[in-house]
Image: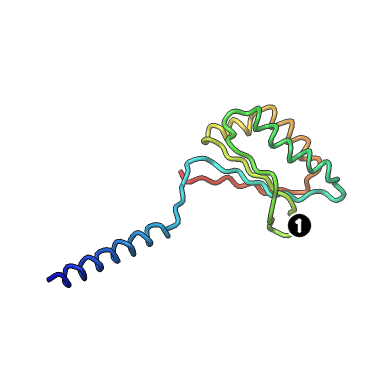
């Protein structure tokens, strides 16, 4: 009888151990309701590194001024399609914040400077809501 109890105990412990390992190994992720605005940029021929930096720094400056901009990213690691070399991303709290950004005078001023030196840009907005 003692042998059966030991076998049952070892089997139970092995089952719990396997289940715990499986649970820990599962990737956890979120599906936030925020809005992500991503822009990939193709610059006009001959635009200086300083001008590019000024535009990308302007994204951070807008974040300090426009309510609802939660986070910004301004360093592109890999950009597609070919010919597009930089990118930035903005996380908005909600749709109202994204709409406010589009109409804000700080955004208008930034867009005016950006438009002068960009050849093209692609700017989708993404959410889970």
Disc 1 element: loop
Say which residue appears at 37% left-offset and 58% top-offset.
23
Q: Image quarter for residue 16?
A: bottom left
Residue 110 location in percent, x, y? 73, 34
Determine which residue is flagged by label 1.
83
Residue most extreme to the right: 46
Crowdedness of circle 1 by 10 Å Cα count: few (<14), some, many (20+)? few
- Residue 88 appears left or right of 2: right
In this view of the protein, which residue sits in the foreground, 72 or 121?
Answer: 72
Residue most extreme to the front: 2
In this view of the protein, which residue sits in the foreground, 40 or 26?
Answer: 26
Residue 30 location in percent, x, y? 46, 48
- Residue 64, relative to residue 30: is it above or below? above
Residue 78 location in percent, x, y? 68, 56
- Residue 70, relative to residue 14: is it above or below? above
In this view of the protein, which residue sits in the foreground, 28 or 43?
Answer: 28
- Residue 10 appears left or right of 82: left
Q: Image quarter for residue 116?
A: top right
Q: Image quarter for residue 64?
A: top right
């Amino acid at each position: 009888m003692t042998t059966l109890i030991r076998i049952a105990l070892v089997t139970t412990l092995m089952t719990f151990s396997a289940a715990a390992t499986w649970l820990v190994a599962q990737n956890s992720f979120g599906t936030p309701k925020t809005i992500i605005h991503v822009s990939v940029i193709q610059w006009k021929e001959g635009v200086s590194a300083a001008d590019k930096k000024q535009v990308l720094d302007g994204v951070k400056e807008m974040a300090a001024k426009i309510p609802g901009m939660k986070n910004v990213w301004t360093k592109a690691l890999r950009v597609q399609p070919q010919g597009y070399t930089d990118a930035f991303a903005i996380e908005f709290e909600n749709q109202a914040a994204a709409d406010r950004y589009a109409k804000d005078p700080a955004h208008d001023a930034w867009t005016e400077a950006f438009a002068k030196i960009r050849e093209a840009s692609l700017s989708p907005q993404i959410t889970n809501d």
